[in-house]
């Protein structure tokens, strides 16, 4: 995902649940959700490394 500052837009409808990766890897560190109505400026990310998230995802995924 590119930020609006680069002129490429931001999170839009239907992007919720998309992973945020460590640059150059396939390691997800957050999931994106929400955004502003014109899909250009705002988005929210839920970190995957906090204890509550790890406890939830551990039931469904093999975590590192």
Image (tube, helix red, strand yellow):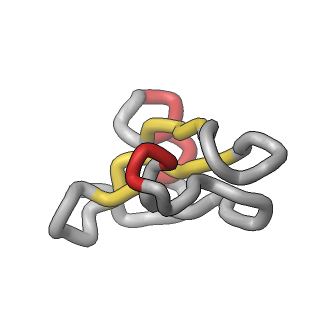
What residue do we see at 26% from left, 71% from top? Answer: 26
Residue 9 quadrant: bottom right
Residue 32: x %, y % from top left: 57, 49
Q: Residue furthest right?
A: 37
What residue do we see at 43% from left, 44% from top? Answer: 5
Q: Locate residue 30 relative to residue 35 in the image: left or right.
A: left
Q: Locate residue 61 relative to residue 41 in the image: left or right.
A: left
What residue do we see at 50% from left, 48% from top? Answer: 4
Residue 64: x %, y % from top left: 23, 56
Residue 22 quadrant: bottom left
> Relative to the observer, which residue lies in front, 6 or 31?
6
Q: How many marks?
A: 0
Q: Locate residue 33 relative to residue 32 in the image: left or right.
A: right
Q: Residue furthest left?
A: 24
Residue 52: x %, y % from top left: 51, 30
Residue 17 quadrant: bottom right
Residue 19: x %, y % from top left: 47, 60
Q: Is residue 18 above or below residue 53?
A: below
What residue do we see at 44% from left, 37% from top? Answer: 47
> Relative to the observer, which residue lies in front, 53 or 31?
31
> Relative to the observer, which residue lies in front, 59 or 34?
34
Q: Residue furthest top?
A: 51
Pick the quarter of the image with the N terminus: bottom left
Q: Is residue 13 above or below residue 56?
A: below
């Amino acid at each position: 995902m590119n930020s609006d500052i680069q002129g490429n837009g931001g999170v839009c409808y239907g992007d919720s649940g998309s992973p945020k990766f460590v640059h150059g890897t396939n390691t997800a560190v957050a999931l994106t959700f929400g955004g502003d109505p014109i899909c250009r400026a705002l988005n929210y990310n839920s970190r995957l490394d906090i204890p509550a998230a790890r406890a939830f995802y551990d039931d469904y995924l093999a975590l590192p």
